[in-house]
Image: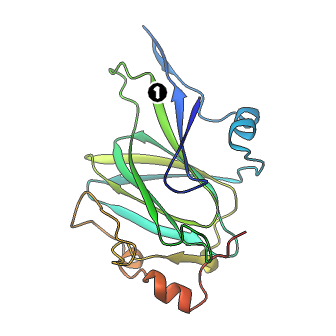
């Protein structure tokens, strides 16, 4: 397991070893002691989510204000452009984003690593499906609280995310996400902890 820093402090890319032989492959996607040691991740995961989406679907950018969730994200099948946006008021990187293409494991490939993305509490998260479909799993450090969930607009010009596909498929809720400055003015953003 290797940890790679990103442009956003706290958001890290995790490279997992994929062990292959004639039977197929094996990898360890979570081991509490190792993640605690390498990421200083002391918060237990309380919820494990999975989504299936078709080509062009964009889910996000979601966050919870009071029950902020850290998310450990990985793609099981397909390929997505995964994005984290720092929405913590007073953060030195407030409003900045990081995006990376994450892929599932191809059984016929010789790839020796598989990637996960750790997104700490206080960041909005979303992804766009680049393949025909994608199966995405993410473990969360707090429970889903629909009354506390907020949605940052996927195309907020002040954030300026460079999404690979210009015409995403959106849910009604995601299509009506708010601009970062409106969320800040309405006091709907998490504070820097």
At x 35%, y 28%, the residue is 106
Q: Quadrant of the N terminus?
A: top right
Q: Is residue 24 left or right of residue 68?
A: left
Find the residue positioned furthest to the bottom: 186
At a point 69% along the width and 33% down the height, the residue shown is 31
Q: Is residue 24 above or below residue 63?
A: above
To which quarter of the image does residue 33 belong? top right
- Mark 1 surroundings within 10 Å by alpha-carbon count, few (fewer than 14), some (14 through 19), many (20 or more): some
Please state the horizontal and vertical placement of residue 154, each as a whole percent of the image: 37, 71
Q: Quadrant of residue 173?
A: bottom left
Position of residue 115 in the picture relative to residue 109 (left or right) = right
Which residue was labeled with disc 1? 113
Callout 1 secondary element: strand
Location of residue 126 in the rendering, given as x and y in whole percent from the top left corner: 44, 61
Of residues 42 and 48, the one drawn nearer to the viewer in this rendering: 42
Q: Is residue 55 left or right of residue 186?
A: left
Q: How is the image coloured?
A: rainbow
Horizontally, residue 45 falls left or right of residue 8, namely: right
Compared to residue 8, the image places residue 144 above or below, namely: below
């Amino acid at each position: 397991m290797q940890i790679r820093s990103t442009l956003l402090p706290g958001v890290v890319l995790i490279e997992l070893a994929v062990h292959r032989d004639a039977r197929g492959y094996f990898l360890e996607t979570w081991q509490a002691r190792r993640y605690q040691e390498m990421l200083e991740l002391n918060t237990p995961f309380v919820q494990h989510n999975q989504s299936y989406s078709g080509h062009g679907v964009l889910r996000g950018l979601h966050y919870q204000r009071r029950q902020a969730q850290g998310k450990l994200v990985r793609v099981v099948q397909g390929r997505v452009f995964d994005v984290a946006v720092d929405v913590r008021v007073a953060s030195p990187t407030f409003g900045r984003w990081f995006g990376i293409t994450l892929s599932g494991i191809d059984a016929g490939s010789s790839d020796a690593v598989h990637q996960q993305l750790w997104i700490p509490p206080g960041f909005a998260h979303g992804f766009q499906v680049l393949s025909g479909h994608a199966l995405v799993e993410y473990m969360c450090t707090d429970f889903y609280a629909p009354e506390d969930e907020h949605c940052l607009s996927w195309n907020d010009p002040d954030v300026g995310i460079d999404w690979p596909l210009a015409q995403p498929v959106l849910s009604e809720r995601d299509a009506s996400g708010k601009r970062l400055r409106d969320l800040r003015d309405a006091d709907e953003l998490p504070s820097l902890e």
